[in-house]
Image: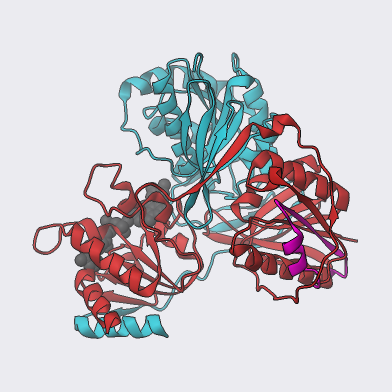
Amino acid sequence: MSNGYHIVVCGSLVPDPLQTLEPVTTPNGPSLKNEMMLPAALDPWAGHALYEAANLAKQNTETKVWLVSLGAKPKLQQLMMSIAQKAAFGFVPVDGSASGFLSAYDCATALSNAIKSIPGLDMQRLLLFGGWESASRGAGITLQLVGETLGITDQFMGVDSIQPNSDGSFTVLERVEGAMHQESLCAGAPAVLGWATGNLPEPVNNPQVGMINMRTIMPALQKAAKANISLDGVEYASVNLPKQLRDTRVVKDMPVEEIAQEIVNWIKQ
Amino acid sequence: MEKILLLNFVNNQSSDEKLLCEAVAAASNLASELGCIWEIGLVGQSVQNAANWVSMAGAAKIYGVEGDDYASSRYSSDLFAAEAIAKKANATLILAMGITRARRILPALSMRLQGRADTHITAIQAVEGKVQLSRWFYRQRMEAAFSRSQRPWVIGLEPGSFQGKAFQAGTAVVELLTLELPDLLKRTQVLGTKSPAGTTQTIRPDAKLLFVAGAGWTKKQSDGQTHVKEAERLILEFLDKTQSSLGSTKSLVDQSGEGNEVLGFMTHLNQVGQTGSTPRHPKGLATCCHGEEPHVVGWRFINERRAINTDPNCGWARGKADVLYVADAFSVMGKVNELLSR
Ligand SMILES: Cc1cc2nc3c(=O)[nH]c(=O)nc-3n(C[C@H](O)[C@H](O)[C@H](O)COP(=O)(O)OP(=O)(O)OC[C@H]3O[C@@H](n4cnc5c(N)ncnc54)[C@H](O)[C@@H]3O)c2cc1C
């Protein structure tokens, strides 16, 4: 392809998966206990999207990558400390709540506005990347709405692979039922790709990339636009943790034959 | 007064009928709770068969969009067809079974209708005449029930969450909409489906048992050696004998990217958990898997859970399984296979 893609990755922070979460009620709807104090990580599927974007940029030096993130500014800054070394990107932060209980629609509006204001972004070359679902709301709605708002008519979800062709078209693999992939050929950008895991391992930290990124990240954070993310017509009746604990029977010192027999009986029940 | 449209894609697959029965049951139950009418919209290469299956289910009307342009799961044409049906039906609640084909278009559909969408809905009911939905947040870590003021409300139902009803088939009258798909919406060509490279078909959504293999299978064992080939043999033999579905931990599937010796048939599609799938099976057996929280959230819809681990303090021991066998999975699974062969 002659002049590369313009890849915008939408991805934000989510509570570290190893943290125990507890819902609390606030005047603005449900929230997580100590949300601002919880260690956060880059939303995993959005992370895969970012690494796939960086990989495409490696293959074509004219391909550019931006990361657009909506979150509380101090938390975004923390997140950048770990992400900035993983891939080169232009950072477009939006200061607002990343809560999974708040509106995907408000979130999509804020992200779309941020994307439209990226200087030099060519909408005809745009590949809008992100996770196909977040690890917070987990609805698979936000990225799709951003695509629709930007007038993009080709969307792919649960993407595990993109293979660009020399004419700008690409083939894409999407996850479908029964552990299969659907393969499609798209004429080219603009398109939305909501990533599943892809095929790339997490990149190793590159301090040089981190230094270059940080030069633009800090000023971008200072100028971050503010977004008001609301409940948007939703009224929560309840938010509950599932009954976490089972009464585990721990079987020690049982002969292998007996364990095997017990398992076989259980399977056949 | 609400009005319900059940939107359904016809894929010409064996699962079509089961999904449609589930969706129809959800829509008709809600309609009777609300005392409102409901209609069906079908999209696919040809929709008459599907319409016949549900012709006696009580829908006031069945709309259809059909033709080669709508044969396969393509975002642009699916959205175009769904939008046309939704505008024709003018419903306040649009329900769709959340298979990948439907889920991909529901958000944009809601936007085109100036409504809102919610997905992965596991329960739907009328509470004092008001529609209330339930879904999970933070990847199955907490469950919420909520209602919404906006209409139309596009609702993606989580497959497997609703009790399907079988209906007597008949001959349906379908109101077919004639649409002209613009060229701009034909930029994508669906080439087909395929299994991930080099894998045997190990994922069986309808299996009674989920068998999870963890990274322990590829780790050094008490003799200081790894036994990956032996692990492969034991796992495949068990899957073959029980026709269970194979799940994995992230650690195990990530190993291929890290250049370690791996189980050849495992891919990221097998991964269960926070960044993997949340399959639905009545039973699950975890082997050589530590039972860490990011993995176990993927077990939300597994009812009976057992685990085999050499570590009595692994995550499963802490209330995550019904039974933990503190034992060597190699020996136990060898014996299990032997018993299953008898
Ligand atoms: C952002 C993020 C997302 C994540 N998402 C997921 C996810 O979606 N799914 C997921 O699975 N994980 C996920 N994880 C990783 C998760 O935290 C754990 O690291 C992972 O599940 C551990 O995998 P494991 O149990 O196979 O491996 P290990 O932790 O290495 O455990 C191996 C186990 O095997 C046992 N063992 C070894 N030999 C034997 C034997 N012979 N017999 C019996 N037992 C034996 C050991 O005692 C040990 O318990 C995520 C982590 C992060 C940070």
Q: Quadrant of the C terminus of chain B?
A: bottom left
Along the viewing direction, whichever of B85 and B106 lies nearer the viewer: B85
Corner quadrant of residue A68: top right
Q: Is residue B183 visible?
A: yes
Note the chain letter of the cyan one: A
Along the viewing direction, whichever of A106 and A239 lies nearer the viewer: A106
Corner quadrant of residue B130: bottom right
- Chain B: drawing colour: red
Residue A207 in percent (x, y) is at 31, 24
Along the viewing direction, whichever of B110 and A95 lies nearer the viewer: B110
Q: Quadrant of the N terminus of chain B?
A: bottom right
- In this rendering, the answer to whether A263 lies above or below A179 is below
Snapshot colouring? by chain
Residue A176 in percent (x, y) is at 53, 51
The residue range painted magenta reads B34-56
Residue B157 in percent (x, y) is at 66, 60
Q: Is residue A174 magenta?
A: no
- In this rendering, the answer to whether B250 lies above or below B313 is above
What residue is at 69 percent from the left and 29 percent from the top?
A150
